[in-house]
Amino acid sequence: MPVQVYTSALLILAGLWLFGAIHHSMLSRGRPVERSQPLFAVFCALMAGYLIVRALGHHPLAGEALAGLWRVEIVTAAMAFAIVPWLVLACTGARPRWSRAALSLYFLAIALGALGVPAAASLTGEWSSWHATEVQAATSPDPVLLYIYIALLLGLVGVLLDGVLACRRQYRSGASGRLLAIGASFGVFAVGSVLELMWLLGIADTFPAFELSLLPTVVLMSAAVGQDRRLSQDRVQALLDHVPAMVTLKDRDLRYLLVNKAFADEHRLDMDEMRGRTDRELFPSEAAWRHQDAEVDLFAAGDDVETEDRVPSPDGTRFLRSMRFPLYDAKGNPWALGCVSVDVTASRHAELEAFELRRQLAHMDRVTRLDAISASLAHELMQPLAAILNNAQAGLRLQEAHSLSMEQVREVLDDIAADAKRASQVIRTLRDMTRPTETAQETVDLADAVNEVLEMVSADMALKGIACISDLAPNCLATASKSQIQQVILNLLLNALHAVERQPEGDRRIEVRAGLDPSGAVLVAVRDSGTGIAANEIQRLFEPFYSTKPEGMGIGLAVCRNLVEGHDGRIWAEGNEPGPGTTFRFTLPARQSTFESPRAASGVNGS
Protein backbone atom coordinates (compact mmCIF):
# COMPACT_ATOMS: atom_id res chain seq x y z
CA MET A 1 0.00 0.00 0.00
CA PRO A 2 1.46 3.41 -0.90
CA VAL A 3 2.58 5.41 2.10
CA GLN A 4 0.45 8.42 1.16
CA VAL A 5 -2.71 6.30 1.00
CA TYR A 6 -1.87 4.54 4.26
CA THR A 7 -1.18 7.74 6.21
CA SER A 8 -4.32 9.37 4.78
CA ALA A 9 -6.38 6.37 5.93
CA LEU A 10 -4.84 6.63 9.41
CA LEU A 11 -5.72 10.33 9.62
CA ILE A 12 -9.29 9.62 8.48
CA LEU A 13 -9.58 6.94 11.17
CA ALA A 14 -8.16 9.39 13.70
CA GLY A 15 -10.83 11.89 12.66
CA LEU A 16 -13.57 9.30 13.21
CA TRP A 17 -12.26 8.47 16.69
CA LEU A 18 -11.93 12.18 17.47
CA PHE A 19 -15.52 12.75 16.36
CA GLY A 20 -16.61 9.95 18.68
CA ALA A 21 -14.71 11.58 21.55
CA ILE A 22 -16.32 14.98 20.95
CA HIS A 23 -19.80 13.52 20.43
CA HIS A 24 -19.87 11.41 23.57
CA SER A 25 -18.19 14.04 25.71
CA MET A 26 -20.85 16.56 24.71
CA LEU A 27 -23.57 14.03 25.56
CA SER A 28 -21.95 13.47 28.95
CA ARG A 29 -21.30 17.11 29.77
CA GLY A 30 -23.37 18.62 32.56
CA ARG A 31 -25.77 15.71 33.04
CA PRO A 32 -25.75 12.32 34.73
CA VAL A 33 -25.21 9.51 32.20
CA GLU A 34 -24.05 5.90 32.19
CA ARG A 35 -20.39 5.63 33.20
CA SER A 36 -19.56 3.96 29.89
CA GLN A 37 -20.29 7.21 28.05
CA PRO A 38 -17.47 9.40 29.48
CA LEU A 39 -15.09 6.41 29.51
CA PHE A 40 -15.68 5.81 25.83
CA ALA A 41 -15.15 9.52 25.12
CA VAL A 42 -11.71 9.38 26.82
CA PHE A 43 -10.87 6.15 24.99
CA CYS A 44 -11.76 7.69 21.64
CA ALA A 45 -9.61 10.76 22.32
CA LEU A 46 -6.57 8.64 23.23
CA MET A 47 -7.08 6.37 20.21
CA ALA A 48 -7.26 9.43 17.95
CA GLY A 49 -3.96 10.66 19.37
CA TYR A 50 -2.42 7.20 18.90
CA LEU A 51 -3.45 7.06 15.21
CA ILE A 52 -2.15 10.56 14.51
CA VAL A 53 1.24 9.71 15.99
CA ARG A 54 1.27 6.43 14.01
CA ALA A 55 0.55 8.30 10.78
CA LEU A 56 3.44 10.68 11.45
CA GLY A 57 5.75 7.69 11.98
CA HIS A 58 5.27 6.55 8.39
CA HIS A 59 7.25 9.44 6.97
CA PRO A 60 11.00 9.41 6.34
CA LEU A 61 12.58 10.31 9.69
CA ALA A 62 15.99 10.20 11.29
CA GLY A 63 16.66 7.31 13.65
CA GLU A 64 16.44 9.40 16.81
CA ALA A 65 13.21 11.08 15.71
CA LEU A 66 11.66 7.75 14.75
CA ALA A 67 12.59 6.16 18.07
CA GLY A 68 11.12 9.12 19.99
CA LEU A 69 7.97 9.11 17.91
CA TRP A 70 7.49 5.40 18.32
CA ARG A 71 7.90 5.77 22.08
CA VAL A 72 5.14 8.43 22.10
CA GLU A 73 2.97 6.08 20.04
CA ILE A 74 3.40 3.21 22.51
CA VAL A 75 2.72 5.46 25.52
CA THR A 76 -0.43 6.85 23.88
CA ALA A 77 -1.64 3.37 22.96
CA ALA A 78 -0.92 2.04 26.47
CA MET A 79 -2.92 4.87 28.03
CA ALA A 80 -5.81 4.21 25.64
CA PHE A 81 -5.74 0.47 26.32
CA ALA A 82 -5.68 1.13 30.09
CA ILE A 83 -9.23 2.48 29.67
CA VAL A 84 -10.48 -0.75 28.04
CA PRO A 85 -10.76 -2.87 31.27
CA TRP A 86 -12.88 -0.16 32.89
CA LEU A 87 -14.94 0.15 29.70
CA VAL A 88 -15.60 -3.60 29.84
CA LEU A 89 -16.59 -3.26 33.50
CA ALA A 90 -18.93 -0.30 32.80
CA CYS A 91 -20.62 -1.98 29.82
CA THR A 92 -21.02 -5.46 31.26
CA GLY A 93 -20.86 -5.05 35.03
CA ALA A 94 -18.47 -8.04 35.09
CA ARG A 95 -16.83 -9.09 38.33
CA PRO A 96 -14.38 -9.18 39.99
CA ARG A 97 -13.19 -5.61 39.78
CA TRP A 98 -9.65 -6.28 40.99
CA SER A 99 -8.72 -8.28 37.90
CA ARG A 100 -9.73 -5.38 35.61
CA ALA A 101 -7.85 -2.95 37.81
CA ALA A 102 -4.76 -5.19 37.53
CA LEU A 103 -5.01 -5.19 33.73
CA SER A 104 -5.30 -1.42 33.70
CA LEU A 105 -2.20 -1.15 35.89
CA TYR A 106 -0.43 -3.53 33.49
CA PHE A 107 -0.94 -1.12 30.61
CA LEU A 108 0.16 1.85 32.70
CA ALA A 109 3.33 -0.08 33.63
CA ILE A 110 4.02 -0.63 29.93
CA ALA A 111 3.62 3.12 29.34
CA LEU A 112 6.15 3.83 32.07
CA GLY A 113 8.49 1.20 30.61
CA ALA A 114 8.31 2.84 27.20
CA LEU A 115 9.14 6.19 28.74
CA GLY A 116 12.22 4.62 30.28
CA VAL A 117 13.76 3.66 26.92
CA PRO A 118 16.60 6.12 26.02
CA ALA A 119 15.55 8.71 23.47
CA ALA A 120 18.70 8.10 21.38
CA ALA A 121 17.81 4.50 20.60
CA SER A 122 17.36 3.89 16.90
CA LEU A 123 15.75 1.16 14.88
CA THR A 124 17.35 -0.71 12.01
CA GLY A 125 17.07 -3.87 10.05
CA GLU A 126 13.90 -5.88 10.10
CA TRP A 127 12.25 -3.62 12.70
CA SER A 128 12.70 -0.35 10.82
CA SER A 129 10.53 -1.19 7.85
CA TRP A 130 7.41 -1.37 10.07
CA HIS A 131 7.43 2.34 10.68
CA ALA A 132 9.29 4.05 7.87
CA THR A 133 9.94 3.64 4.21
CA GLU A 134 13.33 5.21 4.50
CA VAL A 135 15.43 5.23 7.65
CA GLN A 136 18.64 7.16 7.79
CA ALA A 137 21.82 6.40 9.71
CA ALA A 138 20.94 3.50 11.95
CA THR A 139 23.92 2.45 14.02
CA SER A 140 22.83 0.53 17.09
CA PRO A 141 19.75 -1.63 16.72
CA ASP A 142 17.57 -1.68 19.84
CA PRO A 143 14.37 -3.77 19.62
CA VAL A 144 13.29 -2.97 23.22
CA LEU A 145 10.41 -0.75 22.11
CA LEU A 146 9.17 -3.44 19.77
CA TYR A 147 9.14 -6.00 22.55
CA ILE A 148 7.23 -3.54 24.71
CA TYR A 149 4.74 -3.02 21.90
CA ILE A 150 4.27 -6.78 21.52
CA ALA A 151 3.62 -7.05 25.27
CA LEU A 152 1.12 -4.23 24.92
CA LEU A 153 -0.76 -6.03 22.15
CA LEU A 154 -0.77 -9.30 24.09
CA GLY A 155 -2.36 -7.55 27.07
CA LEU A 156 -4.90 -5.88 24.78
CA VAL A 157 -5.91 -9.22 23.26
CA GLY A 158 -6.43 -10.64 26.76
CA VAL A 159 -8.61 -7.72 27.84
CA LEU A 160 -10.70 -7.82 24.67
CA LEU A 161 -11.28 -11.58 24.93
CA ASP A 162 -12.33 -11.06 28.54
CA GLY A 163 -14.75 -8.39 27.32
CA VAL A 164 -16.18 -10.75 24.68
CA LEU A 165 -16.77 -13.47 27.27
CA ALA A 166 -18.31 -11.01 29.73
CA CYS A 167 -20.72 -9.71 27.07
CA ARG A 168 -21.64 -13.30 26.20
CA ARG A 169 -22.37 -14.18 29.84
CA GLN A 170 -24.47 -11.07 30.40
CA TYR A 171 -26.42 -11.56 27.19
CA ARG A 172 -27.19 -15.19 27.99
CA SER A 173 -28.44 -14.11 31.43
CA GLY A 174 -31.06 -11.88 29.79
CA ALA A 175 -29.26 -8.54 29.32
CA SER A 176 -30.14 -6.19 26.47
CA GLY A 177 -29.13 -6.83 22.86
CA ARG A 178 -26.68 -3.93 22.88
CA LEU A 179 -24.17 -6.29 24.51
CA LEU A 180 -24.03 -8.18 21.21
CA ALA A 181 -22.74 -5.01 19.50
CA ILE A 182 -20.26 -4.36 22.31
CA GLY A 183 -19.04 -7.96 22.23
CA ALA A 184 -18.73 -7.81 18.43
CA SER A 185 -16.64 -4.62 18.63
CA PHE A 186 -14.37 -6.22 21.22
CA GLY A 187 -14.07 -9.31 19.02
CA VAL A 188 -13.17 -7.33 15.88
CA PHE A 189 -10.61 -5.32 17.87
CA ALA A 190 -9.13 -8.54 19.28
CA VAL A 191 -8.82 -10.14 15.81
CA GLY A 192 -7.11 -7.02 14.47
CA SER A 193 -4.67 -7.07 17.43
CA VAL A 194 -3.85 -10.76 16.83
CA LEU A 195 -3.18 -10.10 13.15
CA GLU A 196 -0.94 -7.19 14.12
CA LEU A 197 1.06 -9.53 16.37
CA MET A 198 1.37 -12.11 13.61
CA TRP A 199 2.73 -9.46 11.26
CA LEU A 200 5.21 -8.11 13.77
CA LEU A 201 6.50 -11.60 14.57
CA GLY A 202 6.80 -12.45 10.88
CA ILE A 203 4.25 -15.25 11.03
CA ALA A 204 2.04 -13.83 8.27
CA ASP A 205 1.78 -10.73 6.11
CA THR A 206 -1.43 -9.27 7.58
CA PHE A 207 -0.62 -5.58 7.09
CA PRO A 208 -2.77 -3.41 7.58
CA ALA A 209 -5.37 -5.64 9.31
CA PHE A 210 -5.03 -3.86 12.66
CA GLU A 211 -5.84 -0.47 11.16
CA LEU A 212 -8.78 -1.91 9.24
CA SER A 213 -10.21 -3.41 12.46
CA LEU A 214 -10.35 0.03 14.05
CA LEU A 215 -13.10 1.24 11.71
CA PRO A 216 -15.81 -1.31 12.66
CA THR A 217 -14.63 -1.09 16.26
CA VAL A 218 -15.35 2.62 16.60
CA VAL A 219 -18.64 2.35 14.70
CA LEU A 220 -19.97 -0.61 16.70
CA MET A 221 -18.82 0.69 20.08
CA SER A 222 -20.16 4.18 19.45
CA ALA A 223 -23.54 2.78 18.42
CA ALA A 224 -23.64 0.42 21.40
CA VAL A 225 -22.72 3.08 23.95
CA GLY A 226 -25.22 5.49 22.39
CA GLN A 227 -27.84 2.74 22.49
CA ASP A 228 -27.01 2.31 26.17
CA ARG A 229 -28.00 5.92 26.72
CA ARG A 230 -31.14 5.55 24.63
CA LEU A 231 -32.13 2.36 26.43
CA SER A 232 -31.63 4.09 29.76
CA GLN A 233 -33.85 6.95 28.63
CA ASP A 234 -36.45 4.50 27.31
CA ARG A 235 -36.54 2.70 30.66
CA VAL A 236 -36.97 5.97 32.53
CA GLN A 237 -39.64 7.09 30.05
CA ALA A 238 -41.54 3.80 30.40
CA LEU A 239 -41.43 4.12 34.18
CA LEU A 240 -42.56 7.76 34.24
CA ASP A 241 -45.40 7.07 31.80
CA HIS A 242 -46.97 4.86 34.47
CA VAL A 243 -46.65 7.47 37.23
CA PRO A 244 -50.07 9.03 38.04
CA ALA A 245 -48.53 12.49 38.14
CA MET A 246 -47.18 14.95 35.58
CA VAL A 247 -43.38 14.80 35.42
CA THR A 248 -41.14 17.11 33.38
CA LEU A 249 -37.41 17.77 33.09
CA LYS A 250 -35.97 20.96 31.58
CA ASP A 251 -32.42 22.03 30.77
CA ARG A 252 -30.83 25.30 31.81
CA ASP A 253 -32.48 27.04 28.85
CA LEU A 254 -35.83 25.71 30.17
CA ARG A 255 -36.32 23.51 27.14
CA TYR A 256 -38.11 20.24 27.78
CA LEU A 257 -35.72 17.29 27.96
CA LEU A 258 -38.33 14.84 29.13
CA VAL A 259 -42.07 14.77 29.69
CA ASN A 260 -44.23 11.84 30.68
CA LYS A 261 -47.51 10.71 29.17
CA ALA A 262 -49.66 12.27 31.90
CA PHE A 263 -48.23 15.74 31.19
CA ALA A 264 -48.59 15.38 27.42
CA ASP A 265 -52.17 14.11 27.75
CA GLU A 266 -53.08 16.97 30.11
CA HIS A 267 -52.06 19.54 27.48
CA ARG A 268 -53.07 17.35 24.50
CA LEU A 269 -49.67 17.56 22.87
CA ASP A 270 -47.28 14.96 21.47
CA MET A 271 -44.30 14.13 23.69
CA ASP A 272 -41.82 14.31 20.80
CA GLU A 273 -43.27 17.66 19.80
CA MET A 274 -42.63 19.07 23.28
CA ARG A 275 -38.99 18.01 23.61
CA GLY A 276 -36.53 20.79 22.89
CA ARG A 277 -39.14 23.56 23.19
CA THR A 278 -39.96 26.03 25.95
CA ASP A 279 -43.24 26.94 27.65
CA ARG A 280 -43.30 30.20 25.71
CA GLU A 281 -43.19 28.27 22.44
CA LEU A 282 -45.76 25.68 23.44
CA PHE A 283 -48.16 27.89 25.43
CA PRO A 284 -48.07 31.43 24.02
CA SER A 285 -49.83 33.16 26.88
CA GLU A 286 -48.94 35.71 29.52
CA ALA A 287 -49.18 33.04 32.21
CA ALA A 288 -46.56 30.92 30.42
CA TRP A 289 -44.18 33.89 30.34
CA ARG A 290 -44.64 34.51 34.06
CA HIS A 291 -44.22 30.80 34.73
CA GLN A 292 -40.93 30.66 32.81
CA ASP A 293 -39.60 33.80 34.52
CA ALA A 294 -40.34 32.18 37.89
CA GLU A 295 -38.38 29.07 36.86
CA VAL A 296 -35.40 31.24 35.88
CA ASP A 297 -35.46 32.67 39.41
CA LEU A 298 -35.74 29.14 40.81
CA PHE A 299 -32.61 28.08 38.91
CA ALA A 300 -30.77 31.06 40.36
CA ALA A 301 -31.95 30.38 43.93
CA GLY A 302 -31.32 26.63 43.77
CA ASP A 303 -34.11 25.77 46.24
CA ASP A 304 -36.99 23.31 46.09
CA VAL A 305 -40.32 25.09 45.76
CA GLU A 306 -43.84 23.71 46.26
CA THR A 307 -46.73 25.64 44.72
CA GLU A 308 -50.40 25.23 43.89
CA ASP A 309 -51.37 26.77 40.56
CA ARG A 310 -54.56 27.39 38.65
CA VAL A 311 -53.84 26.12 35.15
CA PRO A 312 -56.13 26.61 32.14
CA SER A 313 -56.68 23.44 30.15
CA PRO A 314 -59.03 22.30 27.37
CA ASP A 315 -61.28 20.82 30.07
CA GLY A 316 -61.41 24.01 32.12
CA THR A 317 -59.38 25.36 35.00
CA ARG A 318 -57.31 22.76 36.84
CA PHE A 319 -55.60 22.95 40.22
CA LEU A 320 -52.07 21.55 40.19
CA ARG A 321 -49.86 21.08 43.24
CA SER A 322 -46.28 21.12 41.96
CA MET A 323 -42.85 20.46 43.41
CA ARG A 324 -40.01 22.03 41.41
CA PHE A 325 -36.39 21.18 42.17
CA PRO A 326 -33.01 21.71 40.48
CA LEU A 327 -30.83 18.71 39.64
CA TYR A 328 -27.07 18.95 40.15
CA ASP A 329 -24.12 17.33 38.38
CA ALA A 330 -21.10 15.80 40.11
CA LYS A 331 -19.53 19.26 40.49
CA GLY A 332 -22.59 20.68 42.24
CA ASN A 333 -23.74 22.79 39.28
CA PRO A 334 -27.46 22.78 38.38
CA TRP A 335 -27.98 21.20 34.97
CA ALA A 336 -31.73 20.60 34.87
CA LEU A 337 -35.00 21.52 36.55
CA GLY A 338 -37.38 18.76 37.54
CA CYS A 339 -41.06 19.18 38.25
CA VAL A 340 -43.66 16.76 39.61
CA SER A 341 -47.25 17.98 39.47
CA VAL A 342 -50.33 16.30 40.92
CA ASP A 343 -53.81 17.23 39.79
CA VAL A 344 -55.68 18.17 42.97
CA THR A 345 -58.77 19.52 41.20
CA ALA A 346 -60.99 16.77 42.57
CA SER A 347 -59.72 17.23 46.13
CA ARG A 348 -60.13 20.99 45.88
CA HIS A 349 -63.73 20.55 44.73
CA ALA A 350 -64.27 18.08 47.58
CA GLU A 351 -62.84 20.61 50.03
CA LEU A 352 -65.18 23.28 48.69
CA GLU A 353 -68.14 20.94 49.00
CA ALA A 354 -67.11 20.02 52.56
CA PHE A 355 -66.74 23.71 53.39
CA GLU A 356 -70.23 24.36 52.02
CA LEU A 357 -71.63 21.50 54.11
CA ARG A 358 -69.92 22.85 57.22
CA ARG A 359 -71.31 26.30 56.46
CA GLN A 360 -74.83 24.92 56.13
CA LEU A 361 -74.39 22.91 59.32
CA ALA A 362 -73.22 26.02 61.17
CA HIS A 363 -76.22 27.96 59.84
CA MET A 364 -78.59 25.20 60.95
CA ASP A 365 -76.97 25.22 64.38
CA ARG A 366 -77.41 29.00 64.63
CA VAL A 367 -81.08 28.80 63.73
CA THR A 368 -81.59 25.94 66.20
CA ARG A 369 -79.88 27.86 68.98
CA LEU A 370 -81.88 31.00 68.30
CA ASP A 371 -85.07 28.97 68.35
CA ALA A 372 -84.08 27.79 71.84
CA ILE A 373 -83.96 31.39 73.09
CA SER A 374 -87.00 32.64 71.18
CA ALA A 375 -88.77 33.50 74.45
CA SER A 376 -85.82 35.55 75.60
CA LEU A 377 -85.64 37.30 72.22
CA ALA A 378 -89.36 38.09 72.38
CA HIS A 379 -88.87 39.57 75.85
CA GLU A 380 -85.89 41.64 74.65
CA LEU A 381 -88.00 43.04 71.79
CA MET A 382 -91.14 43.59 73.85
CA GLN A 383 -89.35 45.76 76.43
CA PRO A 384 -88.20 48.52 74.03
CA LEU A 385 -91.38 48.30 71.98
CA ALA A 386 -93.52 48.68 75.12
CA ALA A 387 -91.35 51.59 76.26
CA ILE A 388 -91.80 53.26 72.88
CA LEU A 389 -95.55 52.81 73.11
CA ASN A 390 -95.69 54.15 76.68
CA ASN A 391 -93.62 57.20 75.80
CA ALA A 392 -95.75 57.94 72.76
CA GLN A 393 -99.02 57.56 74.75
CA ALA A 394 -97.62 59.71 77.58
CA GLY A 395 -96.76 62.40 75.11
CA LEU A 396 -100.26 62.31 73.61
CA ARG A 397 -101.91 62.53 77.04
CA LEU A 398 -99.74 65.45 78.05
CA GLN A 399 -100.54 67.12 74.76
CA GLU A 400 -104.29 66.71 75.40
CA ALA A 401 -104.03 67.96 78.96
CA HIS A 402 -101.97 71.05 78.21
CA SER A 403 -99.46 72.22 75.73
CA LEU A 404 -95.95 70.72 75.94
CA SER A 405 -92.77 72.68 76.01
CA MET A 406 -90.02 71.88 73.50
CA GLU A 407 -87.87 70.50 76.32
CA GLN A 408 -90.56 67.95 77.25
CA VAL A 409 -91.04 66.98 73.61
CA ARG A 410 -87.29 66.47 73.25
CA GLU A 411 -87.22 64.20 76.33
CA VAL A 412 -90.07 62.07 75.02
CA LEU A 413 -88.45 61.78 71.58
CA ASP A 414 -85.04 60.93 73.08
CA ASP A 415 -86.63 58.11 75.08
CA ILE A 416 -88.42 56.81 71.99
CA ALA A 417 -85.18 56.97 69.94
CA ALA A 418 -83.19 55.14 72.63
CA ASP A 419 -85.77 52.36 72.87
CA ALA A 420 -85.96 52.12 69.08
CA LYS A 421 -82.16 51.74 68.89
CA ARG A 422 -82.31 49.02 71.50
CA ALA A 423 -84.94 47.08 69.53
CA SER A 424 -83.01 47.68 66.31
CA GLN A 425 -79.83 46.28 67.85
CA VAL A 426 -81.63 43.10 68.91
CA ILE A 427 -83.07 42.67 65.42
CA ARG A 428 -79.69 43.39 63.78
CA THR A 429 -77.94 40.81 65.93
CA LEU A 430 -80.67 38.29 65.20
CA ARG A 431 -80.43 39.01 61.46
CA ASP A 432 -76.64 38.63 61.38
CA MET A 433 -76.74 35.33 63.21
CA THR A 434 -79.46 33.83 61.02
CA ARG A 435 -77.97 35.04 57.73
CA PRO A 436 -77.16 31.97 55.55
CA THR A 437 -73.96 33.55 54.19
CA GLU A 438 -71.10 34.44 56.50
CA THR A 439 -70.20 38.04 57.13
CA ALA A 440 -66.77 39.23 56.06
CA GLN A 441 -63.98 39.37 58.59
CA GLU A 442 -63.59 42.70 60.31
CA THR A 443 -62.16 44.19 63.45
CA VAL A 444 -64.38 42.90 66.28
CA ASP A 445 -64.39 44.06 69.88
CA LEU A 446 -64.98 40.83 71.78
CA ALA A 447 -66.40 42.74 74.76
CA ASP A 448 -69.13 44.25 72.57
CA ALA A 449 -69.82 40.90 70.90
CA VAL A 450 -70.22 39.19 74.29
CA ASN A 451 -72.49 41.98 75.62
CA GLU A 452 -74.82 41.68 72.61
CA VAL A 453 -75.19 37.92 73.12
CA LEU A 454 -75.72 38.41 76.87
CA GLU A 455 -78.55 40.81 76.14
CA MET A 456 -80.20 38.16 73.97
CA VAL A 457 -80.19 35.56 76.77
CA SER A 458 -80.55 37.88 79.78
CA ALA A 459 -84.32 37.41 80.02
CA ASP A 460 -83.94 33.62 79.94
CA MET A 461 -81.34 33.82 82.70
CA ALA A 462 -83.60 36.02 84.81
CA LEU A 463 -86.56 33.65 84.42
CA LYS A 464 -84.43 30.67 85.55
CA GLY A 465 -82.82 32.55 88.44
CA ILE A 466 -79.30 32.39 87.03
CA ALA A 467 -76.77 34.98 88.14
CA CYS A 468 -74.43 36.13 85.39
CA ILE A 469 -71.12 37.83 86.16
CA SER A 470 -69.23 39.43 83.29
CA ASP A 471 -65.67 40.71 83.38
CA LEU A 472 -64.90 42.16 79.98
CA ALA A 473 -61.69 44.09 79.34
CA PRO A 474 -61.94 47.09 76.99
CA ASN A 475 -60.43 47.14 73.49
CA CYS A 476 -60.48 43.36 73.21
CA LEU A 477 -59.91 43.47 69.44
CA ALA A 478 -59.58 40.60 66.96
CA THR A 479 -60.01 40.23 63.21
CA ALA A 480 -62.93 37.86 62.78
CA SER A 481 -66.41 37.26 61.44
CA LYS A 482 -68.60 38.77 64.14
CA SER A 483 -71.60 36.54 63.50
CA GLN A 484 -69.45 33.39 63.71
CA ILE A 485 -67.80 34.44 66.97
CA GLN A 486 -71.16 35.36 68.45
CA GLN A 487 -72.44 31.95 67.42
CA VAL A 488 -69.57 30.37 69.41
CA ILE A 489 -70.33 32.56 72.44
CA LEU A 490 -74.07 31.78 72.21
CA ASN A 491 -73.36 28.04 72.04
CA LEU A 492 -71.17 28.18 75.13
CA LEU A 493 -73.69 30.32 77.05
CA LEU A 494 -76.62 28.02 76.23
CA ASN A 495 -74.59 24.98 77.28
CA ALA A 496 -73.80 26.79 80.56
CA LEU A 497 -77.50 27.61 81.07
CA HIS A 498 -78.40 23.97 80.57
CA ALA A 499 -75.68 22.88 83.02
CA VAL A 500 -76.74 25.17 85.90
CA GLU A 501 -80.54 25.21 85.59
CA ARG A 502 -80.85 21.99 87.58
CA GLN A 503 -78.74 23.31 90.43
CA PRO A 504 -80.42 24.61 93.60
CA GLU A 505 -81.38 28.26 93.59
CA GLY A 506 -78.51 30.40 94.73
CA ASP A 507 -75.97 28.04 93.14
CA ARG A 508 -76.84 28.91 89.57
CA ARG A 509 -73.94 31.06 88.39
CA ILE A 510 -72.33 31.79 85.04
CA GLU A 511 -69.18 33.87 84.63
CA VAL A 512 -68.13 35.36 81.31
CA ARG A 513 -64.68 36.89 80.97
CA ALA A 514 -62.76 38.41 78.05
CA GLY A 515 -59.19 39.61 78.10
CA LEU A 516 -55.68 38.88 76.94
CA ASP A 517 -53.88 35.62 77.74
CA PRO A 518 -50.12 35.51 78.48
CA SER A 519 -49.31 34.65 74.83
CA GLY A 520 -50.95 37.86 73.60
CA ALA A 521 -54.07 36.24 72.12
CA VAL A 522 -57.61 37.37 72.92
CA LEU A 523 -59.22 34.96 75.40
CA VAL A 524 -62.93 34.42 76.13
CA ALA A 525 -63.96 32.12 78.98
CA VAL A 526 -67.44 30.89 80.00
CA ARG A 527 -67.53 29.28 83.46
CA ASP A 528 -70.58 27.54 84.93
CA SER A 529 -71.39 26.10 88.36
CA GLY A 530 -73.06 22.96 87.06
CA THR A 531 -72.34 19.36 87.97
CA GLY A 532 -69.28 19.23 85.72
CA ILE A 533 -68.13 16.75 83.08
CA ALA A 534 -66.06 13.60 83.63
CA ALA A 535 -62.38 13.91 82.66
CA ASN A 536 -62.63 11.10 80.09
CA GLU A 537 -65.59 12.85 78.40
CA ILE A 538 -63.97 16.31 78.22
CA GLN A 539 -61.49 15.04 75.60
CA ARG A 540 -64.38 14.04 73.29
CA LEU A 541 -66.64 17.05 73.73
CA PHE A 542 -65.65 18.60 70.38
CA GLU A 543 -66.06 15.42 68.35
CA PRO A 544 -68.96 15.54 65.86
CA PHE A 545 -72.15 13.82 67.09
CA TYR A 546 -70.83 13.27 70.61
CA SER A 547 -72.94 14.75 73.43
CA THR A 548 -73.16 14.37 77.20
CA LYS A 549 -76.85 15.33 77.10
CA PRO A 550 -79.41 12.62 76.34
CA GLU A 551 -81.28 14.93 73.97
CA GLY A 552 -78.12 16.48 72.48
CA MET A 553 -77.14 16.07 68.82
CA GLY A 554 -73.41 16.58 69.32
CA ILE A 555 -73.21 19.31 66.67
CA GLY A 556 -72.88 22.58 68.58
CA LEU A 557 -69.39 22.19 70.03
CA ALA A 558 -68.05 20.57 66.83
CA VAL A 559 -69.29 23.63 64.92
CA CYS A 560 -67.66 25.88 67.53
CA ARG A 561 -64.33 24.15 67.03
CA ASN A 562 -64.52 24.53 63.24
CA LEU A 563 -65.39 28.21 63.54
CA VAL A 564 -62.63 28.99 66.06
CA GLU A 565 -59.96 27.00 64.21
CA GLY A 566 -61.05 28.69 60.99
CA HIS A 567 -59.92 31.95 62.65
CA ASP A 568 -56.53 30.38 63.60
CA GLY A 569 -57.76 30.08 67.16
CA ARG A 570 -58.10 27.31 69.74
CA ILE A 571 -60.97 26.09 71.92
CA TRP A 572 -60.90 23.71 74.90
CA ALA A 573 -62.70 22.77 78.11
CA GLU A 574 -61.49 22.21 81.67
CA GLY A 575 -63.07 21.10 84.90
CA ASN A 576 -63.31 23.81 87.58
CA GLU A 577 -60.81 23.49 90.38
CA PRO A 578 -61.81 24.11 93.07
CA GLY A 579 -65.56 24.02 92.84
CA PRO A 580 -68.09 22.27 90.59
CA GLY A 581 -68.76 22.98 86.95
CA THR A 582 -66.82 23.39 83.72
CA THR A 583 -65.01 26.27 82.01
CA PHE A 584 -64.93 26.59 78.22
CA ARG A 585 -62.23 28.82 76.75
CA PHE A 586 -61.32 29.90 73.25
CA THR A 587 -58.59 32.18 71.93
CA LEU A 588 -58.27 34.28 68.79
CA PRO A 589 -55.22 36.10 67.43
CA ALA A 590 -55.30 39.71 68.64
CA ARG A 591 -55.61 42.40 65.99
CA GLN A 592 -52.82 44.43 67.58
CA SER A 593 -49.84 43.33 69.59
CA THR A 594 -50.36 45.90 72.36
CA PHE A 595 -53.25 45.50 74.78
CA GLU A 596 -53.67 47.54 77.92
CA SER A 597 -56.33 47.20 80.55
CA PRO A 598 -56.26 47.32 84.31
CA ARG A 599 -56.40 43.54 84.51
CA ALA A 600 -53.78 42.98 81.79
CA ALA A 601 -51.46 45.49 83.41
CA SER A 602 -51.68 43.64 86.71
CA GLY A 603 -50.95 40.28 85.05
CA VAL A 604 -54.46 38.83 85.48
CA ASN A 605 -55.98 37.21 82.40
CA GLY A 606 -59.55 37.29 83.55
CA SER A 607 -60.22 33.60 83.30
Image (tube, rainbow, N blue to C red):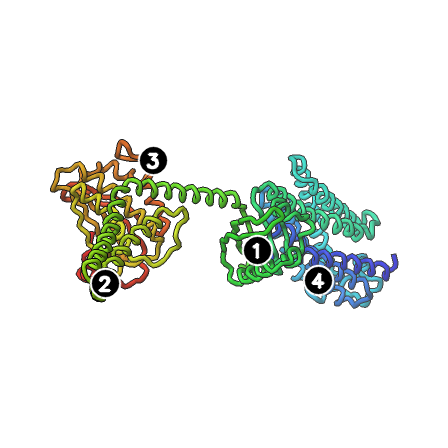
Q: Residues within 10 Å of mark 3 (few under 14, many from 20)?
A: some
Answer yes or no: do the residues labelled 2 and 1 have beta carbons within 8 Å? no
Q: Residues within 10 Å of mark 1 (few under 14, many from 20)?
A: many
Would you say 67 lies left or right of 468 here? right
Mark closer to the observer (3, 2): 2
* Gap between marks 4 and 3 measured at Cα: 90 Å
Question: Which comes sooner in the sequence, label 3 or label 2?
Answer: 2
Question: Which residue is labeled 2 in the image?
Answer: 409
Which residue is painted at 28% across and 49% down in the image? 586
Helix, strand or loop under label 1:
strand
Mark closer to the observer (4, 2): 2
Which residue is painted at 30% across and 54% down in the image? 425
Question: Which residue is labeled 3 in the image?
Answer: 545
Asked if one can make out residue 103 in the rendered structure from this viewpoint, the answer is: no
Question: Which comes sooner in the sequence, label 4 or label 2?
Answer: 4
Query: Horizontal and vertical percent for residue 94?
Result: 61, 42
**Amino acid found under the numbered disc labelled 2:** Val
* Gap between marks 2 and 1 measured at Cα: 81 Å
* Gap between marks 3 and 2 measured at Cα: 57 Å
Up/down of 399 relative to 361, above or below: below
Question: Which comes sooner in the sequence, label 4 or label 3?
Answer: 4
**Amino acid found under the numbered disc labelled 1:** Leu
Mark closer to the observer (2, 1): 2
Question: Which residue is labeled 4 in the image?
Answer: 72
Question: Which comes sooner in the sequence, label 1 or label 4?
Answer: 4
Helix, strand or loop under label 3:
loop
